[in-house]
Image (cartoon, grey):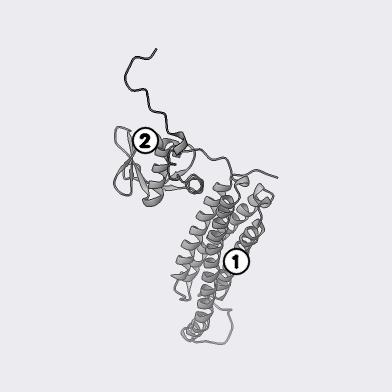
């Protein structure tokens, strides 16, 4: 049974779900207007769907045969992720159908009877319009389903790790300062800034700074993620990873126990010199 980083898989699935949501939004915004412009819009969307199908297959293959399959109820997660592959493929098929139904302008065979090109074009477009609209609507529905299934699977794995400590990966034990910093980022986000001299600072969403020492521990153990695609001078967004969320859930500090009456120290001897 392969040992994998399950919190990392949760993060991958959440990102996959977000990408399905983004693609669903762009497909929904398409205008079912027949012609060359429609073809130019459909091509990139079909390629994007195939890329997402590949990523879903990778996630499914990684989970299959891993230690996660020993957790009760894990079968449901694998089945849900399998549905992502199927639904995404159906979305791609619907857009491919739209390509086939989309009329393009080109010359007919020579020697045929004379036709009114404008009338033929209008008739072809009128016939294709409803077909394109139906294909786009169906594709968008499948993409929305994929996004939901990815987030559902990610939430299921996170819940399984929380409910079954014996399958939980090793997690760092945080100090109070480290836990507070992580919780602050989880509550309101944070940003990392870099000054021209090279020094860095981390600001929480409430405007207060986060000390570099506890933050370095969070970054070292991958409890937070830094958006390095953005400029550090403008500010890089910081979010809590699945591993960080698991630490917050499992190491939540409880109330400090009060001193037991039986443990009250005996008072010292009043005055006098001890022998």
The vertical placement of 97 against 1, above or below, is below
The residue mark sitting in front, 1 or 2, is 2
Q: Nearer the viewer, residue 123 or 146?
A: 146
Q: Residue 45's spot in the image, x, y percent? A: 51, 63
Q: How many marks?
A: 2
Q: Nearer the viewer, residue 86 or 46?
A: 86
The vertical placement of 24 against 183, above or below, is below
Residue located beneath label 1 in the image: 87
Q: Residue 237's spot in the image, x, y percent? A: 38, 47
Instruction: State whether residue 229 appears in this view.
Output: no
Residue drawn where x is 44% and y is 73% of the image: 31
The vertical placement of 183 against 139, above or below, is above
Residue drawn where x is 45% and y is 45% of the image: 254
Q: Residue 126's spot in the image, x, y percent? A: 49, 84
Residue drawn where x is 41% and y is 39% of the image: 176
Residue located beneath label 2 in the image: 212
Residue drawn where x is 62% and y is 44% of the image: 4
Which quadrant: the N terminus? top right
Q: Is residue 26 left or right of residue 78?
A: left
Q: Alpha-carbon neighbours of circle 2 within 10 Å: few (<14), some, or many (≥20)?
A: few
Which quadrant: the C terminus? top left
Disc 1 from disc 2: Cα separation: 45 Å
Q: Secondary structure at mark 2?
A: helix
Q: Is residue 219 left or right of residue 204?
A: right
Q: Earlier in the sequence, mark 1 or mark 2?
A: 1
């Amino acid at each position: 049974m392969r040992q994998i980083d399950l919190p990392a898989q949760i993060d991958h699935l959440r990102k996959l779900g977000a990408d399905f949501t983004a693609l669903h939004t762009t497909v929904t915004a398409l205008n079912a207007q027949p012609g060359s412009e429609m073809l130019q819009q459909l091509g990139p969307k079909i390629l994007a769907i195939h890329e997402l199908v590949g990523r879903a297959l990778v996630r499914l293959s990684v989970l299959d045969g891993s230690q996660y399959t020993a957790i009760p109820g894990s079968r449901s997660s694998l089945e849900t992720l399998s549905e992502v592959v199927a639904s995404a493929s159906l979305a791609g098929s619907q857009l491919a159908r739209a390509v086939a139904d989309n009329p393009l302008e080109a010359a007919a065979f020579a020697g045929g009877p004379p036709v009114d090109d404008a009338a033929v074009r209008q008739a072809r477009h009128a016939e294709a319009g409803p077909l394109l609209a139906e294909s786009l609507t169906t594709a968008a529905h499948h993409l929305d389903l994929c996004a939901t299934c990815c987030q559902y699977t990610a939430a299921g794995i996170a819940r399984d790790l929380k409910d079954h400590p014996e399958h939980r990966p090793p997690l760092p034990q945080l100090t109070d300062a480290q836990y507070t910093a992580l919780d602050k980022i989880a509550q309101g986000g944070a940003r990392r800034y870099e000054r021209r001299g090279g020094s860095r600072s981390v600001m929480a969403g409430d405007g207060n700074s986060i000390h570099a020492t506890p933050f370095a521990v969070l970054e070292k153990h991958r409890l937070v993620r830094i958006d390095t695609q953005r400029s550090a001078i403008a500010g890089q967004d910081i979010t809590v990873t699945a591993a960080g969320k698991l630490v917050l859930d499992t190491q939540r500090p409880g109330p400090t126990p009060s001193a037991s009456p039986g443990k009250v120290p005996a008072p010292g001897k009043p005055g006098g010199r001890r022998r």
